[in-house]
Image (cartoon, grey):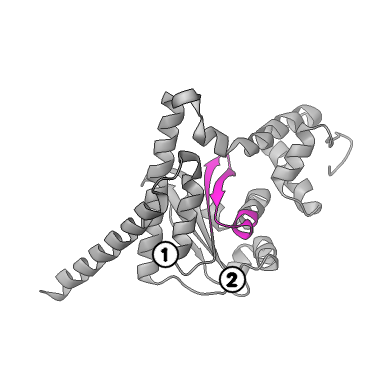
């Protein structure tokens, strides 16, 4: 066998092994648990300690699942800041690898996110776009507690995981459209908490007389200034525990 053919054969075996692990990971799992279960599989297959999956809508990541609290929190940090590898991956439609959040170019590129992430115990973050060559619908975000690159093998596996995430989310989306028994809305239910962000944005628009972008920026700024997530602050706004006033420079 020629070296090129051997290389292709090795890649094929790698993909087959990863596909088998993915299939085993989601076997007998309800639709609503699939995103989190795929995050578990990603952590088993890759040299990472955390994984989360999010849809991206109007610049705000909507987290659908994570394998642990740390991954969920760091993804919420990116949603609060409106900045970080997942935002860059969603905008570019290409993988974004922040291999060292403790020093160097990654810190210069995302200084606030890097500080917040390292404070939470994350030293590297890798974001894989979900979708196709023309449309990015979300990201698979991978985290680990030590700096370092992904090998070519790791990157192929991460891309395969992102492809499987995309297929799963599209299947869940179709289930939402056609309806399952008892009209279970799995995908809508997974992102239900983030409805508060959109509701709060609308309320802030009315309170301040500003547009959507400004209202969302105010929400994020308030959350960051008070060491909270955008989702936490949005829930307070919707519950009328917090109001944004026109006569305040900052909420």
Q: Residue furthest front?
A: 28
Task: Residue at 35% x, 52% y: name it.
Answer: 23
Quadrant where the C terminus is found in the figure:
top right
Q: Magenta span has 63? A: yes
Task: Residue at 76% x, 43% y: name it.
Answer: 233
68 on left or right of 138:
right
Q: Position of residue 54 (x, y in %)?
A: 53, 47
Our reading of the magenta stretch's main secondary structure is: strand
Q: Position of residue 186 (x, y in %)?
A: 50, 34
Q: Kindly state the secondary structure of the residue where label 2 is placed.
A: loop
| Residue range of the region highlighted in magenta in the rendering | 51-73
Q: CA distance from mark 1 to mark 2?
A: 16 Å
153 on left or right of 184:
left
Which residue bears the numbered disc 2?
Answer: 145
Q: Kindly state the secondary structure of the residue where label 1 is placed.
A: helix
Given residues 180 and 225, the one toward you in this image is 180
Which residue bears the numbered disc 1?
Answer: 45
Q: Is 30 situated above or below 102?
A: above
Q: Position of residue 36 (x, y in %)?
A: 51, 50
Q: Quadrant of residue 1?
A: bottom left
Give the crowd class for mark 2: few <14, some 14-19, many >=20 residues within 10 Å.
some
Q: Is 52 situated above or below 143?
A: above
Q: Position of residue 88 (x, y in %)?
A: 53, 54
31 on left or right of 119:
left
Closer to the camera: disc 1 or disc 2?
Answer: 1
């Amino acid at each position: 066998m020629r070296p090129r053919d051997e290389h292709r054969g090795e890649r094929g075996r790698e993909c087959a092994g990863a596909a088998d692990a993915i299939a085993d990971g989601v076997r007998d799992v309800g639709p609503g648990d699939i995103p989190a279960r795929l995050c578990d599989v990603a952590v088993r297959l890759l040299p990472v300690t955390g994984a989360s999956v999010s849809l991206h809508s109007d610049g705000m990541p909507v987290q659908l699942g994570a394998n642990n609290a740390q991954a969920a929190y760091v993804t919420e940090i990116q949603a609060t800041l409106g900045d970080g590898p997942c935002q860059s991956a969603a905008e570019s439609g290409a993988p974004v690898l922040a291999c060292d959040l403790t020093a160097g170019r990654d810190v210069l590129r995302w200084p606030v996110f890097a500080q917040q992430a390292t404070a939470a115990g994350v030293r590297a973050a890798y974001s894989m776009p979900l979708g196709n060559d023309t449309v990015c619908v979300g990201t698979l975000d991978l985290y680990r507690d030590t700096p370092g690159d992904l090998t070519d093998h790791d990157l192929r596996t991460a891309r395969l995981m992102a492809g499987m995430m995309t297929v799963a989310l599209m299947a869940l989306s179709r289930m939402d459209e056609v309806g399952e028994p008892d009209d279970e809305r799995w995908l809508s239910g997974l992102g239900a908490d983030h409805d508060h962000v959109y509701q709060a944005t609308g309320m802030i628009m009315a309170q301040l007389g500003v547009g959507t972008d400004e209202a969302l920026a105010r929400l994020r700024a308030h959350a960051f200034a008070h060491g909270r997530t955008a989702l936490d602050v949005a829930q307070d706004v919707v519950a009328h525990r917090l109001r944004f006033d026109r006569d305040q420079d900052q909420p």
